[in-house]
Image (tube, rainbow, N blue to C red):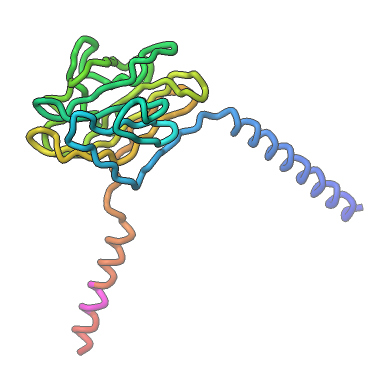
């Protein structure tokens, strides 16, 4: 009887595991999907009046809005340096508006790790609003919102941009992240040097010292 009982227990455990896996699969389908695009691709911003037009969803780029279907974001060269232009199309809100330091400001914020971009963030679609934060040297996080042409939902995310003093050029886009459910996005912390590598280096140093003493 004990063997039969054990078999029944194993059977019940198997059924429970299968049921839990099914629930997990269903709940996984309902979860938001955080999409990272072109994480390791460097997209130069031409220092021209056209700049580059970018569709966040498809990753398509071009030198004009007409040649870049569904474009969202257009960094380009103005008379004074790097400027930003957004697709003016609206579906439930402004398409492609950068997070600003204040609702009425035209200065786009250079967001710090840990910043949240969502529906409560102050957005503006002003053109050329980059002079204070995007015309110096450094790696930037620019918060964005745009209409996802596939779902019709307003999506939130950020673009990673490297700029150079004093005009912002050379400038490169180093990827962008968004949540295709419409949920807010948090900029992750900057990774610290691997402790594993530090430990390995320490171990190598200890071996060298031991060999020196042995000699």
Viewer-side residue, 191 vs 205: 191
The answer to whether residue 15 is left or right of residue 211 is: right
Q: Position of residue 41 (x, y in %)?
A: 33, 46
Q: Position of residue 184 (x, y in %)?
A: 40, 24
- Quadrant in the picture for the C terminus: bottom left
Is there any visible trace of residue 116 in the rendered image?
A: no
Q: Quadrant of residue 118?
A: top left
Viewer-side residue, 50 vs 144: 50
Viewer-side residue, 105 vs 95: 95
Q: Position of residue 150 (x, y in %)?
A: 51, 25
Viewer-side residue, 89 vs 103: 89
Q: Which residue is depicted at the point 78% across and 42% down?
A: 15
Residue 180 sits above or below residue 42 on the image: above
Q: Which residue is depicted at the point 81% across and 47% down?
A: 9
Looking at the rendering, the stretch of residues picked out in magenta corresponds to 205-209
Q: Is residue 206 magenta?
A: yes
Is there any visible trace of residue 91 in the rendered image?
A: yes
Q: Residue furthest front?
A: 66
Q: Which residue is depicted at the point 14% across and 37% down?
A: 169
Q: Quadrant of residue 168?
A: top left
């Amino acid at each position: 009887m004990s063997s039969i009982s054990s078999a029944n227990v194993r059977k019940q455990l198997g059924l429970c595991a299968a049921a839990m896996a099914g629930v997990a699969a269903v709940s996984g389908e309902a979860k938001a999907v955080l999409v990272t695009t072109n994480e390791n691709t460097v997209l130069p911003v031409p220092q021209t009046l056209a700049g580059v037009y970018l569709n966040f969803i498809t990753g398509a780029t071009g030198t004009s809005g007409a040649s870049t279907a569904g474009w969202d974001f257009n960094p380009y060269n103005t008379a004074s340096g790097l400027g930003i232009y957004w697709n003016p199309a609206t579906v439930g809100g402004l398409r492609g508006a950068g997070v600003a330091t204040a609702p009425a400001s035209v200065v786009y914020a250079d967001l710090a790790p840990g910043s949240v971009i969502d529906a409560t963030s102050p957005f503006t679609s002003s053109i050329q609003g980059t002079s204070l934060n995007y015309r110096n040297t450094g790696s930037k996080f620019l918060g964005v919102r745009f209409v996802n042409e596939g779902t019709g939902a307003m999506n939130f995310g950020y673009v990673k941009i490297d700029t150079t003093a004093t005009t912002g050029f050379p400038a490169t886009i180093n990827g962008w992240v968004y949540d295709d459910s419409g949920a807010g996005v948090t900029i992750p912390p900057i990774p610290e040097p691997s402790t594993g590598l530090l430990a390995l280096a320490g171990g190598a140093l200890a071996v060298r010292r031991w060999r020196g003493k042995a000699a």
